[in-house]
Image (cartoon, grey):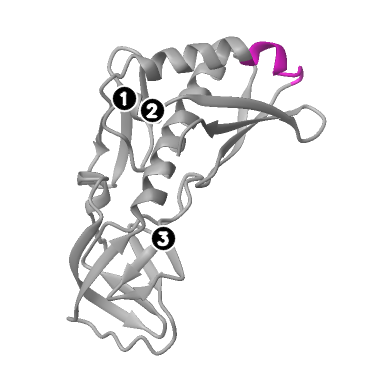
Amino acid sequence: MSVHKQFWADPYQTKLLATVARADGAQIWLDVTIFYAFSGGQESDAGSIGGLPVLRAEKQGLDIAYTLPDGHGLSPGDAVTVAIDWPRRYRLMRLHFAAELVLETICRELPDAEKIGAHIAEDKARIDFALAQPITPRLPAIAAKVQALIDADLAIVSAYSDEANQRRYWELPGLYRVPCGGTHLHRSGEVGELKLKRKNVGQGKERVEITLARP
């Protein structure tokens, strides 16, 4: 089965009327959703389905299972309103794209850097690299290049590369084209001012933490 992922068609949509496709204990599945589930390092949305808080959103192949409180009482065929916490979603989108720009810039500036982990939360994002030398001396120049792309307020293209298998990408035309199934901004300028900080996480490993200057 596969749920229609409306969060790709319109990542700015905050409410949606959906139908329960299946229910099994505390878990339900929908025919259409705007509620993103943890994937690619980006945390799940927060919000509600049918007025009940979503305790967990979990990818299952091309589908998404949502865990609601026990005794939710929902059955297949029930109409429900899906609502997301928009301020959280928007910060995740901004930090996600900031992290993507940082990653692509670092990989161009430091060809030996190998991404070994990433996490995008509401307050900050991080990217972990396998890298022999400290990245600190290069961070100011990297931050300046990323900020220039943000300040240019470039249009961001987000689309399918393989619709049947739900593979997607984002693109800054002429600059970057990157496979990614997350939720994306319309323009790079929405990120705002960012700050980068290096953190040592072990021998031969470098972590770059990304925060936003404004909420």
Q: Quadrant of the N terminus?
A: bottom left
Residue labelled with disc 2? 178
Q: Which residues are magenta?
A: 132-139
Q: Residues within 10 Å of mark 1 (few under 14, many from 20)?
A: some
Does label 2 or label 3 sit earlier along the sequence?
A: 3
Residue labelled with disc 3? 46
Image x and y of residue 26, in percent: 42, 82
Image x and y of residue 189, in percent: 34, 24
Per the image, label 2 sits on a secondary structure element best described as: strand
Residue at the image point whose x is 71% and y is 22% from the top: 131
Q: Are marks 1 and 3 in contact (CB under 8 Å)?
A: no
Amino acid type indicated by mark 1 = Glu
Residue labelled with disc 1? 171
Q: Are marks 1 and 2 in contact (CB under 8 Å)?
A: yes
Q: Quadrant of the C terminus?
A: top left
Q: Is residue 201 above or below residue 47?
A: above
Image x and y of residue 100, in percent: 46, 29
Q: Residues within 10 Å of mark 2 (few under 14, many from 20)?
A: few
| Residue 135 magenta-highlighted | yes
Per the image, label 1 sits on a secondary structure element best described as: strand
